[in-house]
Image (tube, helix red, strand yellow):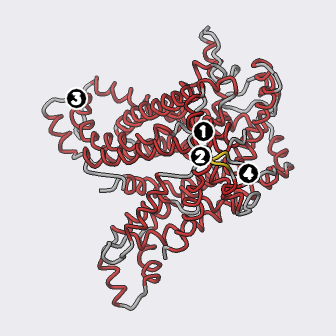
Amino acid sequence: MVESKNISARIGRIVIHTIVISLGLICLLPLWNIVATSFSSSEAVTANAVGLIPVNFTTETYKMIMEDMQFWRSFGISVQRVILSLLINIVLIVLMAYPLSKSKRVFKGRNIYMNLLIFSMLFSGGMIPTYLVVKNLNLLNTIWSLVLPGAVQVFSIILIMNFFIGVPKSLEEAAIMDGANPLQILVKVFIPISLPALATVALFSIVGNWNDFFSGLIYMTKVSNYPLMTYIQSLSINIEEMLKSGANANSLENMMQVSNKNLNAAKIVVSIIPLLVIYPLLQKYFIHGIVVGSVKE
Amino acid sequence: MMLPGMIFLLIFSYIPMFGIIMAFQDYIPAKGMLGSEFVGLEHFIYMFQLPDIGQVFRNTMVIAFGKILLGTFGAIIFSILLNEIRLKILKKSIQTVVYLPHFLSWVVLAAVVVNMFSLDGTVNQILNFFGLEKLNFLGSNSLFQPLLIGTDVWKEFGFNSIVYLAAITAVDPGLHEAASIDGANWWKRVWHITLPSMLPIILLLAILSLPNILNAGFDQVYNLYTPMVYETGDILDTYVYRIGLLGREYSFGTAIGIFKSIIGMILIISANEMAKKFTDRKLF
């Protein structure tokens, strides 16, 4: 593009930079405020003195978290859930996307399976019947109630299927000539070639499972079985109980203030660390994956 | 190869669909689905007679529509502006930061939002500084919907801009050069080149977002609302959860759920057809 050198263009540039950088800061600063809060003393937090720099710097809250057994139990459940789900999701995605990437002539029942998948995305029995199925399978209060209902990720299957369709035919033919069976072709040809797309769906699986609090809420009846997000969520739910017991808006607001705001902030910070570790590693893949997968010709 | 996946699909997607029978029954958990008494459309009739339901339905539409409209605008404007940033490292770091909120859960972000918008929160401190009245964002029926829409736009605009950025990068630089030589300034080039070339993808995404008109965001509302703002904050999903699951009105909750599913399905299919017709592309 031709760079214009006149003054109005230069001012325009400054304005654009200012707007874009402010938008970036608007995304960052509220999160940074939580980090600063977690390192501040509770007096400073109650007095609303914390901005972007911790006031009366202390690591007391983090020491308290170290002793919070339920926090770590929930953390462990979440880690377990993410790993199990990731394995199951990826295996099922690959196993289902590969046959579906074949044409109707090669794979006779393709359209029937495809329609079943799409229909399950369009229509569901809803929250309550799904809950009853999980309950009747005796999965309540087990890790499987968090993992299995989300085992088949239809959207990810379609994304990977589209990626597989784009794999050059000659690669597959060469493998067949060498005497490879379909499973070998899948593992040795298709999977290595689609690692970026698989990284994208892996990120979706990890993020979705780590962040989900709702299945924990409905499928777990004991707090000791809560995954991390459900546990953190339950910390704030007491407020609703207070309201029901007749507390008015102002006293509610006060209660929220004196509660361990900095401790909750620290819990939140610890809970997002795993995501912050994975996210930059996969960022370069997911942008590509989303652009390829969002739209189908 | 399809077998394992199909089994899971059968159990957790198709078997629950039989649960829709419940909506036509007076479901009593102890008797099960086979033993409960059939009552026909009673729950659906009851649903349409409830005074709340119109309100809940309207809230859902307003919140979802606001999010789609403003979210799209925000993402488009942001992607156009970001594209003007030449400094690679600045561009990359801004991208990293604005994508980030998308990956955090509403459980976490609700704490951030409460921190910002509570009576003693940062926003009210700023308002106070300028001598303005404090606003009770989280407890006021008139401010709660704008808060939901605004914070959702904040969470998603960066992530949504990914696709638009890709569309902008695909524009032939020759067009911009030619326009510059003809004396077009930045505004004119954005208006006559960048935006028209983004139009197909904007149209496509707008059409495909249509089915979400009944999904106003359960996680967000659930984590932010209090009984004070049920009037404007309650959406279909939170309503089903409160009445159906917490209130143990299984049949009634299922009836509302089905109502939502059917409308959603009609919207998805028509969106797909519209996308095929207007943009030659489709979701499935």
> Hey, which residue is sitting farthest left in the picture?
B182
Evaluate whether label 3 is on the same chain as label 1: yes
Residue count near mark 4 (Cα–Cα under 10 Å), binned few <14, some 14–19, many ≥20: few
Q: Cα distance, mark 2 to mark 1? A: 7 Å
Evaluate whether label 4 is on the same chain as label 2: yes
For marks 4 and 3, the one nearer the N-term is: 4
**Residue A44 seen by the camera:** no
Q: Callout 4: helix, strand or loop?
A: loop
Q: Callout 2: helix, strand or loop?
A: helix
Q: Mark 1 points at which residue?
A: B43
Mark toward the viewer: 4 or 3 = 4
Label 2 marks a residue whose chain is B
For marks 3 and 1, the one nearer the N-term is: 1
Where residue B2 sits: x, y (%)?
A: 49, 73
Mark toward the viewer: 4 or 2 = 2
For marks 4 and 2, the one nearer the N-term is: 2
> Hey, which residue is sitting farthest top in the picture?
B131
Report if the CB atoms under discs 2 and 1 are less than 8 Å apart: yes
Q: Name the residue under label 4.
A: B29
In the rendered view, would you say B41 is above or below A103?
above
Q: Cα distance, mark 3 to mark 1? A: 57 Å
Residue visible at 25% across and 31% down in the picture: B191
Where residue A243 sits: x, y (%)?
A: 78, 26
Residue B242 shown left or right of residue B145 in the figure = right
Residue count near mark 1 (Cα–Cα under 10 Å), binned few <14, some 14–19, many ≥20: many
Q: Which of B21 and A77 is in front in this view?
A: B21
Q: Name the residue under label 2.
A: B24
Q: Callout 3: helix, strand or loop?
A: helix
Q: In which quarter of the image is the C terminus of chain B?
A: bottom left
Label 3 marks a residue whose chain is B
